[in-house]
């Protein structure tokens, strides 16, 4: 019995070879379909992400105390003084959708503690594509273009709303997936560029 099995395994069999080749061709595509279906953000998750950025943008003019008390996260840290003379507050993890979170969120406060300087959301989970972004925002500015120096570079697209700038970053390593959102007051140059679209 053992020799028959050994002979079968050692003997070239066209049907066995055909089955193996067919399996090798089908398996990767099934696997890739599973991965891409699991990582694509739903329209609802994409919309919630953009709505969260817009809500933060509307609230950024509030005093730091008001802003922090309206923060959507469950945990917020004590402000720490950064080397640039600003205070940094961790906003913790924000659950945005079923498969999407802002794994890290940070709030930068001016040294005099009177203004919110910026908010950064680092995203994790399902992929919000550039097409999702463009469907939501037809008018945008290009803040940064990758120079091909490293995979950590990003394409950053900016939207100006209510005198505030929301920057959406797509990393070179995964160019079609939104990785971070930065919200800050828009400077004069950005406001002028944004006016050209309106």
Image (spheres, grey):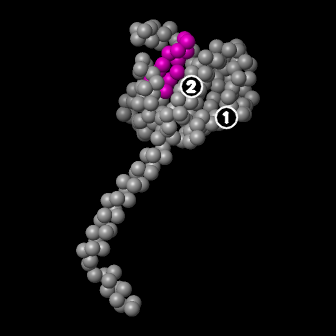
Q: If the image is split into quadrants, where does the N terminus sit?
A: bottom left
Q: Is residue 161 magenta?
A: yes
Up/down of 196 relative to 66, above or below: above
Q: Residue at x 70, y 15 (%)?
A: 63
Q: Residue at x 47, y 12 (%)?
A: 190
Q: Is residue 21 magenta?
A: no
- Image label count: 2
Is residue 21 visible in the rendered structure shown here?
A: yes
SS at badge 1: loop
Circles 2 and 1 in contact, beta carbons < 8 Å: no
Up/down of 9 relative to 190, above or below: below
Q: Position of residue 91 (x, y in %)?
A: 67, 31
Instruction: Name the disc covering residue 23, or none.
Output: none
Q: For the residues marked 2 and 1, what is the alpha-carbon distance in whole angstroms?
A: 18 Å
Q: Residue furthest front?
A: 44
Residue highlighted by disc 2: 51
Instruction: Name the disc covering residue 92, or none.
Output: 1
SS at badge 2: helix
Q: How packed is label 1: few (under 14 Cα within 10 Å), some, or many (20 or more)? A: some
Q: Residue at x 43, y 9 (%)?
A: 198
Magenta segment main secondary structure: strand
Up/down of 46 relative to 23, above or below: above
Q: How packed is label 2: few (under 14 Cα within 10 Å), some, or many (20 or more)? A: few
Q: Which residues are magenta?
A: 157-168
Is label 2 or label 1 in front? 2
Task: Kindly indicate the quadrant of the structure image that contains residue 146.
Answer: top left
Is residue 180 visible in the rendered structure shown here?
A: no
Q: Position of residue 141 (x, y in %)?
A: 42, 18
Q: Position of residue 79 (x, y in %)?
A: 72, 26
């Amino acid at each position: 019995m053992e020799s028959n099995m050994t002979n079968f395994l050692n003997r070239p069999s066209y049907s066995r070879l055909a089955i193996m080749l067919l399996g090798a061709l089908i398996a990767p595509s099934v696997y890739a379909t599973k991965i891409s279906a699991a990582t694509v953000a739903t329209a609802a998750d994409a919309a919630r992400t953009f709505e969260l950025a817009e809500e933060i943008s509307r609230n950024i003019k509030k005093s730091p105390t008001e802003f922090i008390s309206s923060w959507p996260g469950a945990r917020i840290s004590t402000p720490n003084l950064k080397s640039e003379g600003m205070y940094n507050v961790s906003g913790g993890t924000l659950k945005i959708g079923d498969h999407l979170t802002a794994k890290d969120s940070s709030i930068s406060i001016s040294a005099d503690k009177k203004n919110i300087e910026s908010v950064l959301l680092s995203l994790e989970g399902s992929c919000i594509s550039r097409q999702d972004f463009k469907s939501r925002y037809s008018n945008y500015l290009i803040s940064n273009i990758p120079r091909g120096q490293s995979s950590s570079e990003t394409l950053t697209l900016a939207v100006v709303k209510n005198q505030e700038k929301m920057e959406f970053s797509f990393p070179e390593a995964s160019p079609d997936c939104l990785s971070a959102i930065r919200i800050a007051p828009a400077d004069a140059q950005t406001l002028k560029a944004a006016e050209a679209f309106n």
